[in-house]
Image (tube, rainbow, N blue to C red):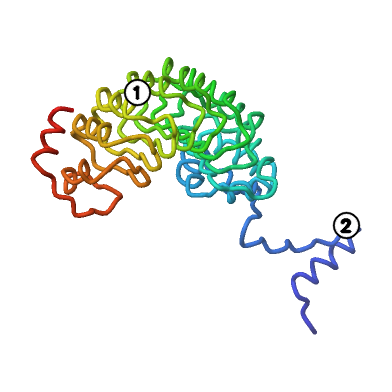
Amino acid sequence: MCTLHPEEEAHLMAMASGGQPTRTASPRPLFKASTAPLRSLFDVCWDDVLIPQVAIYLSLKDLFNLRCCSRTAQRFVEAALEKRQELHLSGNNTKNIDVGFRVLARCCQRLEVLHLACCRWLTDELLLPLLTNNKKRLWAVNLNECVNITALSLQPIIVECKELRVLKLSKCQWLTTGAVDALTLHQSKLVEFDISYCGAIGERCLIIFFRKLNKLTVLSLANTPSVTDQVLIQIGNYCRELEHINLIGCATISDYGVHALTSSCPLLQSLMVQRCPLVTERVLAPLRGRVHIDRPSMGYMPTVRHHRLFLQV
């Protein structure tokens, strides 16, 4: 007589009593299915981690590529741009950059340094919103060779950028005497100033300007026709902290003005006077060894007569 397996016996008994056969419980899974939501990079704290520790190492190109990935990425990039302190676009004339600049103008709120030199696409319409949003913190602005903006863009810089220290406007033919007069009135903390190749500014305007801007350490006046000996005398009298000056192509200055300047600026480290035909080795020779001069020595040997001449200046 064969014996039944206990499960078979239980099954037959359940059928005999009219009940449902019992089923053995299925084995339990070894791991429970997780019900927690999926996590992503953007779940890490933005203000404390992602922006100060990650976003600062991404270029503008990287940020704009990331911005295209999702709506969350777009919000993250715009939050990072809001806290960005420097913007460097000098010489960048790539296609459709003006479209990207509108995003920067809208998002950037804490810029301190702005470099836009040689941006041919830049206009007042594009620049003014950016300046309006960042006027409280800006201390360095470079607009060298920005030929398609006007003096209108300088208004928020001149009047409202109270922390301005560096201003570069080389080859900005739109810079007028009126704009420099306004700069003289509202700015007194500039330490670096560049108005090379700006032909519309008069001698009197520069004389008044340098009487007020007495903290300058770096000054570029290359190829500015209104720079004369009288202007150099005023620079020497009032800008005693001057360390570097560029006078290349200032054809009207002479030994008289250069001597007055260099004898009054004890901190002077470099003097650039190429293409200044009236500046001779008579005034440059005594400076060599103490001041870097961009012209080679011509072997000049000063005489007693020349020393007496300088004592009379």
The residue at which mark 1 appears reads as 210
Is 12 positioned to the left or the right of 113 in the image?
A: right
x and y percent of residue 279 in the render? 29, 41
Task: Locate residue 17 relative to residue 46 in the image: left or right.
Answer: right
Image coordinates for residue 304, horizontal then vertical, percent: 8, 40
Vertical side of 56 occupied by 210: above or below: above
Q: Check the image and report above or below for 65 versus 142.
A: below
| Residue carrying label 2 | 19
Residue appearing at x 44%, y 39% in the figure: 223
Element carrying mark 1: helix
Earlier in the chain: of badge 1 and badge 2, it is 2
Q: Is residue 294 above or below residue 124?
A: below
Amino acid identity at mark 1: Phe
Q: Could you give the CA–CA distance between mark 1 and mark 2, rounded to whole angstroms?
A: 109 Å
Q: Residue 76 is drawn in which quadrant?
A: top right
Residue located at (64% from left, 52% from top): 34
Image quadrant containing the N terminus: bottom right
- Estimate the x, y position of residue 21 in percent, counting from the top left: 84, 62
Q: Position of residue 98 (x, y in %)?
A: 67, 40
Q: Secondary structure at mark 2?
A: loop
